[in-house]
Image (spheres, rainbow, N blue to C red):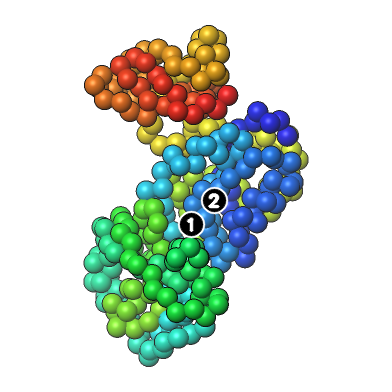
Amino acid sequence: MDEKLQGWLNLYKPFGISSFSAIYKIKKKFNIKKIGHAGTLDPNAQGVLPIAIGKTTKLIPFINFDSKIYNFTIKWREQTLTDDAEGKIINYSKKIPQVNEINQTIPSFLGYINQIPPKASAIKVKGKRAYSLLRDHKIFKLQPKKVFLKEIRLLYSENDTSKFSIECGKGFYVRSLARDLAIRLGTFGHVIHLKRTKVGNFDYKRSILLDDLLKIGQSEFEFNYFHSSISMLDDILAYEIEERKDLYDLSLGKSIFINKNKLIKKPLNSDKKELVFLSNKGKIISYGKLSDDLFQPNKVLI
C-alpha cells in the first residue's frame, strides 16, 4: 500500500475478537505499515472502533472521546467477578427490579460521578494490569475515577434482563455502571451484551464490518472506505494551505504566516495561543500553535 496514504477507517468490530487482533488482520490483509486504533473495545463487546492509517495515527488523541454511545443489556440477580458474562458468579439475589424502580434510580448516575473500574480491566496497579492480577488470583483494590454520564435511557425490560442506551465521556466503564446500578436497586447484575454505536464522528451507520472489509480488494478499500483525516475531527480550528511555498516550509518544520480570517471557525483572540490544524485537500498536514498570524508547528504530517 502507498506509504503516503492516510485517513480514517470506521470499523465495526465483531464480538469475540480483541481490538488489537482486528487491526492486525487489516494490517496484514492490506499491507499497511502504520495503523492504530482509538477507544479500545473488549473482546466480548462489539461496535464502532476508529482506525487510523499512516500519519493519521498522530491524530488519534484529537478524536472526540467525550461523546460515546453504547447499547447494553444487564442480567439481574447475578454479580460476576468480571462484571460481564465471562466471569464466575460471586453474588446472587432473588430480586428483579421493576421498570418504575429503574427509571426512578438511573437519573442519580447522571453527570460527573466517581466510578470504580472493573477488576478485569487494563487499569494499572503498581505497574501491573488489573486483569493480570485478577487472573493470578491476587488481592487488590482499584481507586475510583471521575467519569461523566450525559444520558441514560431504559429501552425495555424482559424477564430477568433490561436493555439500556447511554451517552458518556472518556474512561467510562459500562460494566461498572451495571454493577453499581444493580446494587443501588438492591440486587446484583452484570452485562451480557455490549455494543458501541458512536465515538465522536464515528457512527455505526457508516461503519464497515470487519469480515466484509477483509473480503474486498485493496483498491476498493482505498477509494470507498477511507475518510479524510480532517473529516472525523470535531469542531477544530482548521486552515486550508494552498501555497506551494507554505507546504514546502511546513515540510521542513518551519513556521508560516496565515490569515486568521480564513480559519474554519470564528477568528482567534490575538493574545491567546490555540491549537490549530492545517489541511490540504482534506488531509491534516500539520498541527501547532497560532500566535497572532504566526503558525508554529508541533507536528508535521507531510
Camera-side residue of 223 and 141? 141
Q: Is residue 131 above or below residue 292?
A: below
Residue that carries the numbered disc 2 in the rendered image: 49
Report the residue at 58% width, 24% height from top: 302
Report the residue at 48% width, 85% height from top: 89
Total numbered badges shown on the rendered structure: 2
Residue that carries the numbered disc 1 in the rendered image: 196
In the image, farthest residue toward the front? 126
Is 14 on the left or on the right of 182, as rendered? right
Amino acid, disc 1: Arg
* Residue 227 visible (yes or no): no
Amino acid, disc 2: Leu
Rendered location of residue 163, percent (x, y): 42, 69
Report the residue at 33% width, 28% height from top: 274
Q: Is residue 138 above or below residue 69?
A: below
* Mark 1 to mark 2 CA distance (whole Å): 8 Å
Camera-side residue of 42 and 128? 128
| For marks 1 and 2 on the same chain, the one whose residue lies earlier in the sequence | 2
Camera-side residue of 247 and 129? 129
> Mark 1–mark 2 contact, CB under 8 Å?
yes
Res 200 → quadrant: top left
* Residue 231 visible (yes or no): yes
Is 82 on the left or on the right of 153, as rendered? right
Q: Is residue 54 above or below residue 167?
A: above
Q: Is residue 189 above or below residue 59?
A: below
Rendered location of residue 196, percent (x, y): 48, 57
Report the residue at 51% width, 20% height from top: 253
